[in-house]
C-alpha cells in the first residue's frame, strides 16, 4: 500500500513508466484501495471507460476507387514485357535448325543423290532449250556476215559517182 | 499500399483516431466526421503511406492536425461554445461512480487542448512519451511537463470537488 502511495505521487509528477501506470490502474480496479486513495478511483475508471469508446468503422467500399487506367497501363506493359522475354528465351534456347531437303512438285526430297540427278537432268533440259532458242540468232548473224560485201558496194558506188562528176566538170 | 494493407494498418486505428478526435473536438459527432475525413484523405494518398516508417504515430499526428484545423476553422466562423461549467450534482448522484466518471471526463475536457490530448494519449491509449512527442511535435521533456500539469490540475479539482461535496453533504468545513 505504501508502494501505491509512492506510485501515485510519482504519477502526478509525470515520472511513472507505462508499467507502473498499468500497476496503478490495476490497483484501482480492485476493492483493496486505501480510503485516502478512493477519490482518485474515478480518474482511473474514467481512463478505462474512455478506452472502450469505439468509432463507427468506415466502410472501405465507400472510399473512392483507385484510378484503374494507370493500373491497366502498368499491367499491359508488364504482360507485354513478359511475353517478349518468353519469346526471346525460346528463340535463344531453340534456334532455327538448317534443313537439308529439296522441293520437287511440292514434295520434300531428302535423298541427296536423287536430288542431284534430278537437278542435273533439269539443267540439261534448260541447256537444250537455250540452244534451240539461240539457233535463229545464229542464222541472223550468218545473214549479216553475208551482207557485208553489199555494204562495200555502196562505198564503191559513191566513189564511182565522184569520179563521174569530176569527169563531167572537165 | 493496397486495400488489405490499408485495412490492417489504418482502419484498425479508427478507435484511437476517434478517441483522439473526441478529446480535441469534445464532440462525438464531430469526432466521427473527422475520422471519416482522415480515412478518406489517407486512402487517397495510400500510395505514399508505404514510405512511412511508423504508421500509427504518423496517422495520429495527421488526426490531431486535422482536428486542430477544424477548430481553427470553427473559430473563424464563430467563437467556440464556452467551456462546460461545473455541474452541480445532487447527493444521490454524487454517490454514483458513473457520475464521478462523467465529472472526471468533464474535468479532462476542460483542460487546454494540448494537456487533454497528452493525458489521454498517455493514460487512455498507453502511448510512449516518444510517440506522444512525435504526434504533438514537442520534445519528450515538454510532454512530461504538460502531462504532469494535466494530472496535477485534475487532482486539485478532484480534491476541491471532494471538499465541496463533503461541505454540502456532511457539513464539514
Image: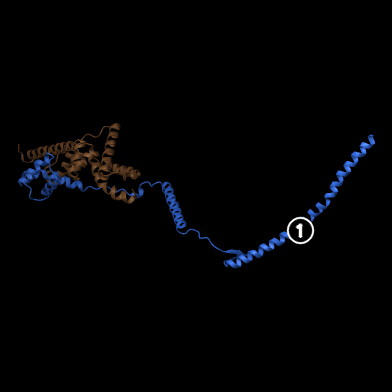
Chain colours: A blue, B brown
User: A151 above or below A106?
Assistant: above
- For image coordinates 63% across by 66% down, the residue present is A118
Q: Residue A27: x, y in percent?
A: 10, 48
Q: Residue B79: x, y in percent?
A: 26, 32
Quadrant for the C terminus of chain B in the image? top left
| Picture mark count | 1
User: In front: A22, or B104?
Assistant: A22
User: B46 above or below A99?
Assistant: above
User: In front: B85, or A118?
Assistant: A118
User: Left or right of A84: which side holds A103?
Assistant: right
Q: Residue B138: x, y in percent?
A: 21, 36
- For image coordinates 27% across by 38% down, the residue present is B65
- For image coordinates 57% across by 64% down, the residue present is A101
Residue A105 visible to the viewer: no
Q: Secondary structure at mark 1?
A: helix
Residue on which the image places disc 1: A135
Residue B3 visible to the viewer: yes
Q: Residue A80: x, y in percent?
A: 45, 52
User: Left or right of A58: which side holds B131?
Assistant: left
User: Left or right of B84: which side holds A59?
Assistant: right
Q: Tell me the subunit letter for badge 1.
A: A
Few, some or many C-alpha atoms within 10 Å of disc 1 (few <14, some 14-19, many ≥20)?
A: few
Q: Quadrant of residue B130?
A: top left
Amino acid at each position: 500500500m505504501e508502494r501505491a502511495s509512492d506510485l501515485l505521487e510519482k504519477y502526478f509528477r509525470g515520472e511513472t513508466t507505462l508499467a507502473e501506470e498499468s500497476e496503478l490502474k490495476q490497483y484501482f480496479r480492485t476493492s483493496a484501495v486505501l480510503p485516502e486513495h478512493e477519490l482518485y478511483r474515478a480518474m482511473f475508471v474514467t481512463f478505462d471507460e474512455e478506452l472502450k469508446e469505439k468509432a463507427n468503422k468506415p466502410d472501405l467500399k465507400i472510399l473512392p476507387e483507385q484510378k484503374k487506367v494507370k493500373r491497366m497501363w502498368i499491367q499491359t506493359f508488364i504482360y507485354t514485357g513478359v511475353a517478349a522475354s518468353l519469346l526471346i528465351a525460346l528463340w535463344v534456347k531453340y534456334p532455327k535448325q538448317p534443313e537439308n531437303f529439296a522441293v520437287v512438285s511440292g514434295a520434300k526430297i531428302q535423298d541427296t543423290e536423287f536430288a542431284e540427278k534430278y537437278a542435273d537432268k533439269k539443267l540439261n533440259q534448260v541447256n537444250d532449250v537455250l540452244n534451240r532458242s539461240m539457233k535463229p540468232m545464229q542464222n541472223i548473224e550468218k545473214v549479216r556476215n553475208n551482207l557485208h560485201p553489199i555494204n562495200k558496194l555502196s562505198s564503191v558506188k559513191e566513189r564511182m559517182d565522184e569520179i563521174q562528176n569530176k569527169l563531167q566538170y572537165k | 499500399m493496397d486495400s488489405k494493407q490499408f485495412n490492417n494498418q489504418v482502419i484498425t486505428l479508427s478507435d484511437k483516431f476517434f478517441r483522439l478526435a473526441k478529446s480535441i473536438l469534445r464532440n462525438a459527432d464531430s469526432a466521427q466526421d473527422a475520422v471519416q475525413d482522415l480515412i478518406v484523405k489517407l486512402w487517397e494518398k495510400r500510395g505514399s503511406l508505404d514510405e512511412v516508417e511508423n504508421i500509427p504515430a504518423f496517422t495520429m499526428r495527421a488526426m490531431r492536425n486535422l482536428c486542430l484545423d477544424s477548430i481553427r476553422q470553427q473559430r473563424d466562423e464563430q467563437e467556440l461554445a464556452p467551456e462546460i461549467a461545473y455541474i452541480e450534482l445532487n447527493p444521490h448522484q454524487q454517490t454514483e461512480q458513473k457520475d464521478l466518471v462523467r465529472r472526471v471526463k468533464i474535468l479532462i475536457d476542460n483542460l487546454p487542448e494540448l494537456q487533454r490530448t497528452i493525458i489521454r494519449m498517455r493514460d487512455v491509449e498507453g502511448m510512449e512519451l516518444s510517440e506522444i512527442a512525435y504526434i504533438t511535435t514537442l520534445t519528450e521533456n515538454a510532454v512530461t511537463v504538460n502531462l504532469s500539469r494535466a494530472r496535477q490540475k485534475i487532482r486539485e479539482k478532484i480534491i476541491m470537488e471532494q471538499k465541496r461535496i463533503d461541505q454540502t453533504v456532511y457539513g464539514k468545513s
